[in-house]
Amino acid sequence: MMDLWQSFVAGVNESMPWFDGNIAAIIIILIKAIALIVPLLLTVAYFTYAERKVIGYMQLRIGPNRVGPKGWLQPIADALKLMTKEIIFPTKANIYLFLLAPVLAIAPAIAVWAVIPFDEGIYVTNLDVSLLYVLAIGSIGVYGIILAGWASNSKYPLLGALRSASLLVSYEIVIGFALVTVVMIAGSVNLNTIVSGQQGGIFNWYFIPLFPMMIIFFISALVETNRAPFDVVEGESEIVGGTHVEYSGMTFAVFFLAEYANMILMAVLAVIMFFGGWHSPFEGVPYLEVAFAWVPGIIWLLAKSTFFMFLYLWVRATFPRFRYDQIMRLSWKIFLPITILWIFVVALMTQLHIGPWFA
Amino acid sequence: MSSEQIIFYILSFWFIASSLAMIFARNAAKAVLFLVLGFFSAASIWILLEAEFLAITLILVYVGAVMVLFLFVIKMLNIDKSTLRAKFAGYLPLGIVVALIIIAEMTLVLGNAQFGLDVMPSPARHAADYSNITTLALQLYTTYVYPFELAAVLLLIAIIAAITLVQRQEVNRKKQSISEQVKVKAKDRVRIVTIASPSKEGK
């Protein structure tokens, strides 16, 4: 197998000399990307199923249970339905931008995953500024929504896009400030280093000194991903479906995929930033540490992320929608002052060498 | 040609092409999107120069925030391109003069005399574990800490000035106090009065 691979690489290098012999690296990156994207999209599909089931039970319903055993094939059926539906273009729409919008929504939502570390050494790339990369690429996702609203040439999408533009920009500031405190403790913007800094048991995780920041990060993540109770961008009861009104079939499905991929990303990011990433919660606990030593780190990361993904659904089933101005007030007058205050608190804790975090 | 050079030429071509397309685009929203593409190409070239912090900051600040607000404004204004095009011929001579001055200035500053290979040899490649952001932070917070702080204070003044400018008319402004709204009880708003119902005779 190895011989076959080496002869293949040698052959490609010979026929394409302008790659400087980097062709093997490019192929490996492509394989890594596929190994990441396929499970991600499957997770998105079954996250929608989980959402309908969880909210169903919370509202004393059963949820989807007709397609396949216990409704397990429901997401597959939904995907097939959306793929075979007709895509309708509004007559006065700007077709190029109308089609570019879903692409601009899904591309950053998947590209962000390139720097996410799943375990010691399991990542697509180990970028030195990976946290900044996540914030930068994550901020591009708003173009999808704004363009969808503008290119549709329709009332409700425009209103939804107007709402989202200012909302997302203001909450990016809050998320940025909340993550600055993590960077201050870890002393790095590399996600791998941030996770390594939380090694050594549950008391070394950053959510203890940064508890308010963790709460603010989670709430801001709800806004960034347009989730209830902050889903004013879609707001079915006010502006029909917001930016998605004119989209049908696969173009709508792409927006849907992007939203759920972003939700999963935010859950994983919360775990990496505040809950020790791939580290086991039993580190340093006698007996339990040995008993759970066989569990690979990626399982811990995914288990912790699943809890946060469940929180998204729980919140959606629990709270009524916020009014637009209340969300803006929450960001600028409450969250931003708290995060700035907490930067000073973290600086103070660093000076006083408090706990295992600032040793 | 090495792969690095090929990538550089592709990115440069995209940068120039998107900048030109930005100028010639008839649609304002499309012009903004071409500018975004231009920013991306510039950021990619910076990454090729091992300046990944600058590149990502460019995307974070300009693409992620400034251009979003640009699009926001363009959506609000209904720009009529025909009136702009009518003035094109009138502004053309002045525009050509300004463009020539800018080209002359840039050739003088960025020409071979200052940035030629004999004056500035091409920088050596750093090892894979070289951290651009650490080096930058050390410089910024030791050697250049006062200019850095001054710039921060300047930005703070700009923020406060902008807020005071939009907040100047206090009269007739309707404000809502959320804490009062939350604290309100039913008996503050609704008064229930018992009225004796009139009898059938109308007494």
Image (tube, rainbow, N blue to C red):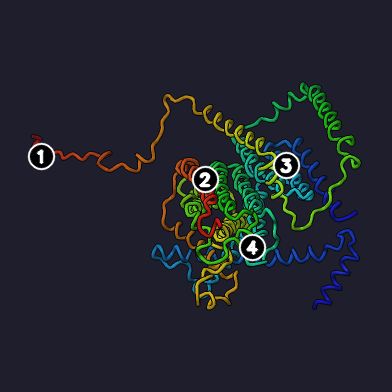
Residues at badges 1 and 3 in contact (C-beta under 8 Å)?
A: no
Which residue lies under the disc numbered 1? B200
Q: Residues within 10 Å of mark 1 (few under 14, many from 20)?
A: few
Instruction: Examine the rendering and report whether any part of residue A240 can be seen.
Output: no
Tell me the residue at 21%/40% (across/down): B192
Which residue lies under the disc numbered 4? A117
Asked if labels 1 and 4 share a chain, the reply is no
Of circles 1 and 3, the one toward us is 3
Residue B136: give x, y in percent of width and height: 71, 46
Q: Of callouts 4 and 2, which one flags the residue occurring earlier in the amino acid sequence?
A: 4
How far apart in space, not on screen, are marks 4 and 2 (Cα)?
29 Å
Of the residues shown, which amino acid type is indicated by label 3? Answer: Phe
Determine the secondary structure under disc 1: loop
Q: Is residue A50 above or below residue B161?
A: below
Q: Residues within 10 Å of mark 2 (few under 14, many from 20)?
A: few
Q: Quadrant of the N terminus of chain B?
A: bottom right
